[in-house]
Image (spheres, rainbow, N blue to C red):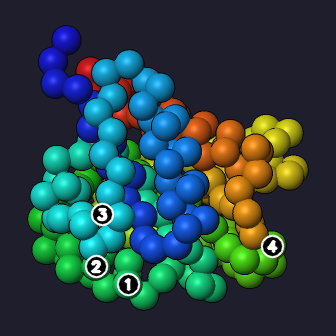
Amino acid sequence: MGDPCRVLVLYDHGDLLAALAQEVAAGAQEVAGANVSLLKLPDASREDLLEADAIIIGTPNWTGIKGSLKRWLDTTGDMWEEGLLAGKVGAAFTTSAGRHSGTEFTLLNVLHWELGSGMIIVGLPWTPTMERSGSYYGATAIGGLTDDDRAQGRALGRRVAEIAERLKR
């Protein structure tokens, strides 16, 4: 069967974000053959990015990507120039204190970095759950973690792992 598909769930600080990251990782682990790493900044390394077949990045919404994550991602500019992340599957998730504080903008900030790296972006297809939770750009949680948020997080992780597994084959 070959090497297992490696999924990296990388997230920045925040209790709500950590809880959503756990759900994203749990969804990825549902895919047979997926080897999932759940890493919080600053514990991740550039090597973790290189070894992964899929990278799902989470940041709290601070009206955009959090500065500590942005600084860390900026250290990977040489990887961008060399195309070392091109072809990997990418996705995003975020949490926020309020519904109208730019969660989709934050997701798009992360996806912008992934697109610039040549990654293949995966979002979520629309479901009725999105009327209450989430975005097709990625998984979200606002103010707390609901059952719908958990389901969206697991769905994103599972979808990314399934697509990365198919591409790896």
Compared across the picture, whether 87 is left or right of 103 comes to left
Q: Whole-Å distance between the Cαs marked 4 and 3?
A: 29 Å
- Percent from the top left, x then y, of residue 7? 33, 42
Callout 3, which amino acid? Ser
Q: Tell me the residue at 48%/82% (across/down).
A: 66
Compared across the picture, whether 43 is left or right of 155 comes to left
Residue 23 - label: none
Q: Whole-Å distance between the Cαs marked 3 and 1?
A: 19 Å
Q: Mark 4 or 3 closer to N-term?
A: 4
Q: Residues within 10 Å of mark 3 (few under 14, many from 20)?
A: many
Mark 4, secondary structure of its residue: loop
Can you tell which of label 3 and label 1 is closer to the viewer? 1
Q: Quadrant of the N terminus?
A: top left
- Percent from the top left, x then y, of residue 144? 73, 63
Callout 1, which amino acid? Ser
Callout 2, which amino acid? Trp
Q: Whole-Å distance between the Cαs marked 4 and 2?
A: 27 Å
Mark 2, secondary structure of its residue: helix
Callout 4, which amino acid? Arg
Q: Whole-Å distance between the Cαs marked 1 and 4?
A: 23 Å
Q: Whole-Å distance between the Cαs marked 3 and 2?
A: 14 Å
Mark 3, secondary structure of its residue: loop
- Whether residues under marks 1 and 4 lie with C-beta atoms below 8 angstroms apart, the answer is no
- Which residue corresponds to mark 4? 99
Residue 68 - label: 1
- Which residue corresponds to mark 2? 72
- Percent from the top left, x then y, of residue 31? 43, 24
Determine which quarter of the picture holds residue 29.
top left
- Whether residues under marks 4 and 3 lie with C-beta atoms below 8 angstroms apart, the answer is no
Observer able to see residue 25: yes
Q: Mark 4 or 2 closer to N-term?
A: 2
- Which residue corresponds to mark 3? 117
